[in-house]
Image (spheres, grey):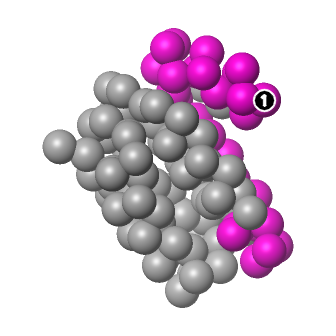
Amino acid sequence: MTQVTIHEDGENLVALLSGEIDHHWAAILREEIDERVRSRSPAKLILDFSGVTFMDSSGIGLILGRHRLVSTLGGVVIVQKAPREIKRMLSIAGIEARE
């Protein structure tokens, strides 16, 4: 089962993602993350992919859409701890993932 746990870290929001991110789950994750982003306007939204076991192109859309939302609020999105297979997909899409 896919899920997201979101917590605050100072001015930042950290979203710990786990499970599979496909078209169905990306929409659910988007709603949960966007609700918190809009209510908090974080300086950084950190998307932690350490628990993600599968991701298709919907995951790329999830990241890019959050980037668009957070940047309109004056913040930045950081992708971190992506598994090697997902990191490769992010690289092809031009998205940098931190360790």
Q: Is residue 34 in sight in this rendering?
A: yes
Q: Amino acid at mark 1?
A: Gly
Q: Which residues are magenta?
A: 69-96
Where residue 71 appears, as percent x and y from the top left, is 79, 66
Q: Is residue 10 above or below residue 5?
A: below
Q: Is residue 20 above or below residue 8?
A: above
Name the image quarter holding the N terminus.
Answer: top left
Q: Nearer the viewer, residue 51 or 34?
A: 34
Is residue 90 within the magenta segment?
yes
Is residue 37 within the magenta segment?
no
Where residue 95 appears, as percent x and y from the top left, is 73, 33
Q: Is residue 40 left or right of residue 26?
A: right
Where residue 58 appears, as percent x and y from the top left, is 50, 43
Q: Is residue 16 in sight in this rendering?
A: no
Residue denoted by label 1: 94
Q: Is residue 17 left or right of residue 59?
A: left
**Residue found at the far bottom of this picture:** 39
Q: Which residue shows up at 63% across the image and 60% down it?
A: 66
Q: Is residue 93 left or right of residue 16?
A: right
- Mark 1 nearby-residue class (10 Å; few <14, some 14–19, many ≥20): few
Tally the marks. 1
Q: Which residue shows up at 71% across the image and 57% down it?
A: 67
Q: Which residue shows up at 47% across the image and 20% down it?
A: 83
Name the image quarter holding the C terminus.
Answer: top right
